[in-house]
Image (cartoon, rainbow, N blue to C red):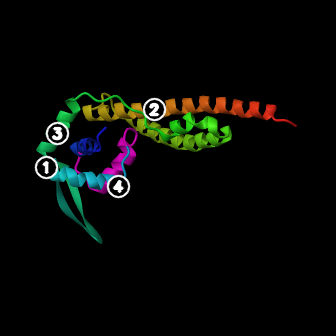
Amino acid sequence: MSLPHAILALLENENASGYDLARHFAHSAGHIWSATHQQIYLELGKLHQAGWVSYEIVSQDGKPDKKVYGITKNGTGELIRWLQRPSSQKRVREPLLIKVLGSHLIDSDDLIQELKRQREDNEISLAHFLNIEAEFKRKPVPLSLEQRSIYLALRRGILDRKAWLEWANEAEQLLEEDVQTAALNEPD
């Protein structure tokens, strides 16, 4: 996925500051894409140079002025072009999987501890996504086209977290069997 296009998609819904976009990523688009404040501000500058977004300076009481960005006609055209192009196949780039591939070189307990650390993050994300889903279920049916789009992306995030947790359960079980077998084979 392209961060610039993710930003354009969010701005298509409503104008926002860089800070607001970071919050949107954390609370609505975070189930499909994550971005740091720094990445967002860098991309906003590039999008502005490309003519895909414009901004308005907004004064704030007791705070520095802020830039509120909006998508331009050219930005909407670029977003539509990108949306209509075929997507590439998702490539998994998860450092944990490299650790799994090399785990025969370390004690299984080390990998079990790593799985437990990452399990907590995935459980927190899943709980957050399920809360958002519950909000959707309280909305009147049928959903608007925009709400449906967000809901479908949310469901993908939920299923991804559930699949990861199922895999982690399986991996932990196999690793714990290795630990038990090793303990039984230790000389007294």
* Disc 3 residue crowd, few under 14, some 14–19, many 20+, Cα 10 Å: some
Which label's residue is closer to the chain start, 1 or 2? Answer: 1
Q: What residue is shown with label 2?
A: 160
Q: Are marks 2 and 3 in contact (CB under 8 Å)?
A: no
Tell me the distance, in whole angstroms, between the alpha carbons under discs 2 and 3.
29 Å
Residue wearing tag 1:
51
Dividing the picture into quadrants, the one containing residue 10 is top left
Give the residue at x 57% y 33%: 168
Amino acid residing under circle 3: Glu
* Mark closer to the chain start, 4 or 1: 4
Which secondary structure, mark 4? helix
Q: Which residue is mark 4?
A: 37
Estimate the x, y position of residue 154 in percent, counting from the top left: 39, 35
The residues bearing labels 4 and 2 have C-alpha atoms spaced at a distance of: 24 Å
- Image point 27% across, 45% down: which residue? 7
Magenta span contains residue 55: no
Segment tinted magenta in the rendering: 14-33
> Could you say where residue 157 lies in the image, as x and y percent from the top left?
42, 34
Q: Quadrant of residue 87?
A: top left
* Residue picked out by circle 3: 78
**Residue nearest the viewer, comparing 162 with 82:** 82
Measured in 3D between alpha carbons, the distance from the residue under mark 1 to the one under mark 2, in whole angstroms, is: 35 Å
In the depicted structure, whether residue 184 falls above or below residue 29:
above
Amino acid type at image mark 2:
Asp
